[in-house]
């Protein structure tokens, strides 16, 4: 038998020797349990207002003395307070001062999100502003992760932080967008290409009727931001590479939401809510190809984004779909990099794919005939 070799240990049954307790205010209410489940959350302005823990999500154990745990709680409280103050200066002091409820803020690993959306139904459940903010935070993170995976990027190839503002009211959008992006606020959706990467938008009910439509818009516009800001950071839409700029945004819309419905207002003059073939573009592209009405690559690759017609948007999507599906994401990434460094589409196509504007079309057409459904 061994005796006399016990190690002195402070044990506290109350906190299981952790030195702190999870803040009770976030344990029971379903929307607050999310804070602990959602590992992506770094800060949330709703928990930051908690009277018990001030957003640290824990409270000091009164029954034991654990200096390290106490210091850690204080550090967390301090971080939340500093972040909250920064968001107040950057956003709360800028948006409509008469608003009845405060704008909510969320910090996730790669996104600083502000949300004032009114409740929306998602999967037959009504989600309030706070729940919607967490959902959109997750959606933006997962889009970014998908973008990184698709193009075989490293994390440092993309901006560390996307700034996204999802407003309910146009007034907040109009006040915030000049400040956040440094450009005017005539459009519904403002993207700033360059650093920092900013998307400021409000929910225009004419074209964002429900959560699915709004989600599709966010996917489309955040994809533009990611592509433009992918190193080296340059917008391709005004360098005759409109088909790449729009095509990639449509491609992610289709992949995540199975439909393409967004044409930036500066891309195409149209009534809000107008679309092309119900957003299902493979059959109409196939028809353009089989009836020999499809625009050639040589011609498509002379257009800026704002010069593309509806049909050309669909063709841009299809060329991107072809290159990504047949040749993979890494090659497309290298192709985009060459374009950003000044190559023409012709030069980039030759260097990366060994194709020319004339030889790409027969291959693309054969692939469309084989892969795209007639209806
Ligand atoms: Zn304790
Ligand atoms: Zn929250
Ligand atoms: Zn709390
Ligand atoms: Zn677009």
Image (cartoon, rainbow, N blue to C red):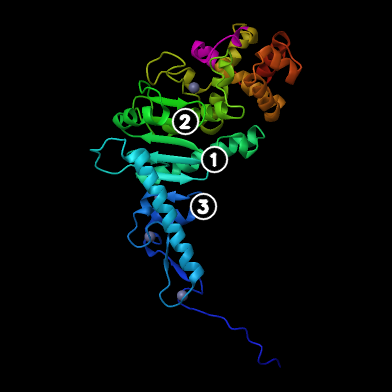
**Mark 2 or mark 3: whose residue is earlier in sequence:** 3
Q: CA distance from mark 1 to mark 2?
A: 14 Å
- Residue 114 in percent (x, y) is at 39, 40
- Residue 66 in percent (x, y) is at 49, 73
**Mark 3 or mark 1: whose residue is earlier in sequence:** 3
Q: Taking 257 as reference, is 101 above or below it?
A: below
Q: Which residue is mark 2?
A: 216
Q: CA distance from mark 3 to mark 1?
A: 13 Å
State the image quarter where residue 210 is shown: top left
- Residue 39's disc is 3
Ligand 4: does it lie within 8 Å of the C-beta at label 2?
Answer: no
State the image quarter where residue 188 is shown: top left
- Who's the residue at 45% across and 45% down the image? 107
Q: Secondary structure at mark 3?
A: loop
- Residue 258 in percent (x, y) is at 53, 29
- Residue 305 in percent (x, y) is at 52, 15
Q: Is residue 41 left or right of residue 49?
A: right
Q: Which residue is mark 1?
A: 142
- Who's the residue at 35% across and 20% down the image? 186
The magenta segment: 299-313
């Amino acid at each position: 038998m061994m005796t006399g070799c016990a190690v002195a240990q402070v044990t506290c049954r109350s906190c299981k020797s952790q030195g702190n307790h999870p803040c009770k205010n976030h344990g029971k209410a379903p929307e607050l349990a999310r804070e602990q489940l959602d590992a992506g959350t770094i800060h949330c302005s709703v928990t930051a207002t908690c009277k018990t823990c001030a957003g640290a999500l824990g409270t000091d154990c009164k029954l034991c003395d654990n200096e390290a745990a106490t210091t850690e709680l204080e550090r967390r409280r301090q971080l939340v307070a500093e972040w909250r103050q920064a968001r107040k200066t950057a956003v709360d002091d800028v948006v409509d001062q008469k608003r009845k409820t405060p704008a909510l803020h969320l910090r996730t690993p790669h996104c600083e999100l502000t949300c004032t959306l009114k409740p929306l139904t998602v999967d037959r459940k009504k989600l309030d502003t706070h729940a919607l903010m967490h959902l959109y935070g997750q959606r933006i993170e997962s889009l970014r992760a998908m973008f990184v995976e698709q193009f075989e990027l490293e994390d440092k190839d993309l901006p560390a932080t996307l700034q996204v503002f999802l407003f309910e009211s146009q007034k907040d959008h109009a006040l915030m967008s000049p400040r956040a992006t440094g450009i005017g606020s005539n459009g519904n959706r403002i993207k700033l290409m360059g650093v920092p990467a900013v998307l400021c938008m409000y929910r225009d009910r004419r074209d964002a009727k429900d959560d699915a439509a709004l989600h599709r818009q966010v996917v489309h516009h955040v994809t533009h931001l990611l592509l433009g800001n992918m190193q080296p950071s340059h917008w391709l839409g005004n360098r005759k590479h409109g088909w790449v700029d729009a095509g990639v945004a449509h491609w992610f819309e289709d992949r995540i939401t199975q439909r393409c419905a967004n044409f930036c207002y500066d891309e195409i003059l149209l009534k809000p809510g107008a679309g092309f073939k119900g957003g299902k573009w493979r059959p109409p592209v196939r028809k353009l190809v089989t009836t020999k009405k499809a625009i050639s690559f040589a011609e498509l690759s002379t257009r800026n984004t704002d010069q593309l017609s509806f049909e050309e948007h669909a063709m841009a999507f299809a060329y991107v779909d072809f290159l990504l599906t047949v040749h993979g994401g890494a090659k497309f990434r290298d192709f985009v990099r060459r374009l950003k460094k000044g190559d023409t589409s012709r030069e980039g196509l030759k260097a990366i794919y060994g194709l020319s504007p004339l030889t790409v079309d027969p291959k693309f057409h054969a692939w469309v005939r084989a892969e795209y459904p007639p209806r």
